[in-house]
Image (cartoon, rainbow, N blue to C red):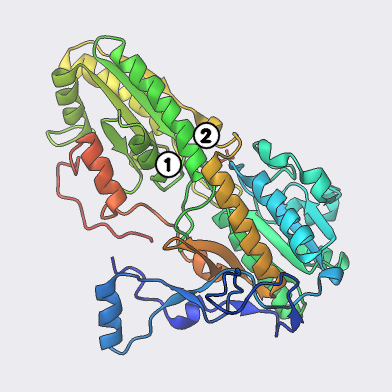
Amino acid sequence: MFEHLDLNESDLIVDTLGEAKTPSPLKLSTVYGDRIANYVRDTESVLLYHDRDVVLSQLKEGKPLLAFELAGPRQNIYFRPEKTRAGIVTCGGLCPGINNVIRSIVMTLHYRYGVRVIYGFRYGYRGFIKKYGYEPLFLTPENVRDIHEKGGSILSSSRGSQDMEEVVNTLERMGISILFVIGGDGTMRGAYEIYSIIKQRGLEISIIGIPKTIDNDIAYVEKTFGLETAFSVAADAIRAAHTEAIGAPNGIGLVKVMGRLSGFIAANAALALNEVNFVLIPEIDFDLYGPKGFFSALERRIKERGHCVIVVAEGAGQQYVRAEGTDESGNPKLGDIGVFLKSEIKKFFMNDVGIEVNLKYIDPSYMVRSVPANPHDSMYCMQLAQNAVHAGMAGKTGMLVGRWNGRFTHVPIKLAIKKRKQLSPEDPLWLSVLEATGQPMMMVNEPQQSYSSSE
Ligand code: F6P
């Protein structure tokens, strides 16, 4: 619960390019109570800890109350709209909602601020590098009008870093004032590098991140866009697995879902469709064999109920299937725990238990992320994009738009890339999973060492 108390006030300060002197064209109010929507002051904030006891103890100890800057439109902006040139880039794996974000950035820049020059850089950071030869797309409300209906990214994407000095050269040459970077943790590390080079060179270019990943593993962001759509599709796979499991003697439906080293998709999908009996996630170790291991619990379940549904997150149980190396984004490569479990479970029932099981394995794989955003993600994407535009126009930089305690926030990129967010076994979300599945709290024979969350 107190995992963020090692932070200092300075960790949450958002950088700006300079004083915002141009009156915003939005014509909002500065007075609460006049029934007109309001500008947000830089001093408005969202507490990092909103638990009353924590707040009181911090005050008692004379410690500062750590808080994120609140996102939203500012009364004065830094960039003059008629002179502003914006860029958008989408990096990393695809994710539902990318096109919604692109569309809303373009619409907000154009209709709310009057910005007329907006470029979309193609294929991630490669789009800035001459040797790849990708010409940027000129984006207008007209040509982004229908894109939110489609999955993927109209700009396409790529993994991996590039020569960030050259990226900044391109931004400088094209006179870009604000670059919106849509991506996950690897992308944000790249965005931070770009921001640092811009700062070193003393350029007036704002870097604004929009956290995108179905994995929901970005620190200090309550929820990344794409997660909800992804787990809804994963829930369809669970439905199929359950149908198959109850349709055969001793049926076992095994579903593997994406999520890398975080179990959010698995946990949420299991709760979305309450037919799951075991959820295996990277954050919680499990033994296969032995009286307290997973297979003993599975044997009991099959003997008692005659069927079972298991959801395994792709990053779970990596000690059994360890893979070497990292991908282009710097993420550790994962061994295939789904295929491994499929064959080990069959072997266990055949050799150790001596009963027939019917195991059906489903891996929805890229299907969970290549679909269009569902209504809730669509709305979330739009609001992230609107707040990203407000932040960029106000001259904020080196930050991403987050959400904390239900409100949109400004998070320094440097802070967000410090660690990977994972699902803590002490998170109420995990307790819901335990209560919904009835699975043992721990499936290890020896007591586990204390868990240290990276969030
Ligand atoms: O990070 C998003 C994600 O979809 C992960 O859940 C998955 O492990 C990975 O990307 C797949 O990456 P790639 O597109 O490189 O195959």
Residue 414 in sight here: yes
| SS type, badge 1 | helix
Name the spot of residue 234 as percent of width and height, x first.
Answer: 45, 32
Q: Check mark 1 vs ligand 1: CB closer than 8 Å? yes or no.
A: yes
| Residue in the foreground of this view, choosing between 388 and 208 | 388
Q: Quadrant of the N terminus?
A: bottom left
Q: Is the Cβ of the residue at disc 2 closer than 8 Å to that at disc 1?
A: yes
Q: Few, some or many C-alpha atoms within 10 Å of disc 2 (few <14, some 14-19, many ≥20)?
A: many
Amino acid tagged 1: Ile
Instruction: Please tell me whether residue 87 is drawn above or below residue 316 in the rendered image.
Output: below
Q: Would you say 243 lies left or right of 347 here?
A: right
From what the image shows, is residue 1 above or below residue 224? Answer: below
Q: Position of residue 400 (x, y in %)?
A: 58, 64
Please report the residue visible at 40 percent of the width from the left and 45 percent of the height from the top. 264
Identify residue for label 1: 265
The residue most toward the front is: 34
| Front-lying residue, 106 or 10 | 106
Q: Is residue 311 left or right of residue 350?
A: right
Q: Which mark sits nearer the N-terminus, 2 or 1? A: 1
Q: Is residue 190 visible?
A: no
Label 2, ligand 1: CB separation under 8 Å = yes
Q: Is residue 418 above or below residue 159?
A: below
- Residue 17 location, quadrant: bottom right
Q: Which residue is mark 2?
A: 368
Q: Is residue 112 left or right of residue 318?
A: right
Residue 247 percent coordinates (x, y): 31, 10
- Can you say which quadrant of the picture contains the C terminus? bottom left
Q: Residue at x 53, y 76 (%)?
A: 32
